[in-house]
Image (tube, grey):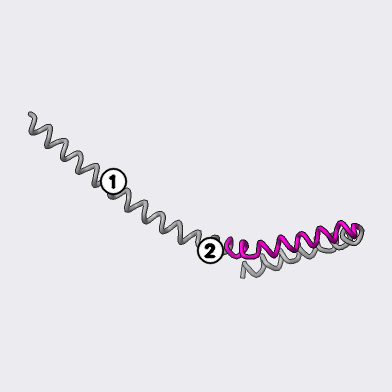
């Protein structure tokens, strides 16, 4: 009885180890697939982070100009809003083709 119990326990251990090995292989394959899918987004994010200091400097300059010339800044911002919309339409059209 003791030997059969030990044998069953050994078989169960081998079965569990085999199952763990398969799960690890599956997890590894899924993680590689996930990295391949998200690679373009990661590259885009890195590009955005590269321009962060310039964007911060530009925002500071625009803010300072807006504080010194509020009427001009208001008019300028009203002209820029449609341009941003046009840029989005053009970008979407280029992405579709």
Q: Nearer the viewer, residue 21 or 73?
A: 73
Element assignment for label 1? helix
Looking at the picture, how far across and down is residue 74, in whole percent? 88, 58
> What crowding class fits label 2: few (fewer than 14 Cα within 10 Å), some (14-19), or many (20 or more)?
few
Q: Position of residue 96 (x, y in %)?
A: 62, 67
Q: Point out residue 32 in the picture as x, y percentages from the top left corner.
A: 41, 58
Looking at the rendered structure, the number of numbered marks drawn on it comes to 2
Q: Is 20 situated above or below 50? A: above
Q: Residue at x 77, y 59 (%)?
A: 60
Q: Is residue 23 above or below residue 78?
A: above
Q: Is residue 96 magenta?
A: no
Which image quadrant is residue 41 in? Answer: bottom right
Q: Nearer the viewer, residue 66 or 97?
A: 66
Segment colored magenta: 45-70
Is 1 placed left or right of 12 in the picture?
A: left
Return the mark for residue 68: none
Instruction: Find residue 4 and report its image quarter.
Output: top left
- Residue holding disc 2: 40
Give the left or right position of residue 77, taking residue 43 as reference: right
Residue 66 counted in the magenta span? yes
Could you tell me which residue is drawn at 40 percent across and 54 percent down? 30
Q: Main secondary structure of the magenta part?
A: helix
- Residue, disc 1: 20
Residue 55, above or below 19:
below
Q: Please tell me in which quadrant of the rendered image residue 3 appears.
A: top left
């Amino acid at each position: 009885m003791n030997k059969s119990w030990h044998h069953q326990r050994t078989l169960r251990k081998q079965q569990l180890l085999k199952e763990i090995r398969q799960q690890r292989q599956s997890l590894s394959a899924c993680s590689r697939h996930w990295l391949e899918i998200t690679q373009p987004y990661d590259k885009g994010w890195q590009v955005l982070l590269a321009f962060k200091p310039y964007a911060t400097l530009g925002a500071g300059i625009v803010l300072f100009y807006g504080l010194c010339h509020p009427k001009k800044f208001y008019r300028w911002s009203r002209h820029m809003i449609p341009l941003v919309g046009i840029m989005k339409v053009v970008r979407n059209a280029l992405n579709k083709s």
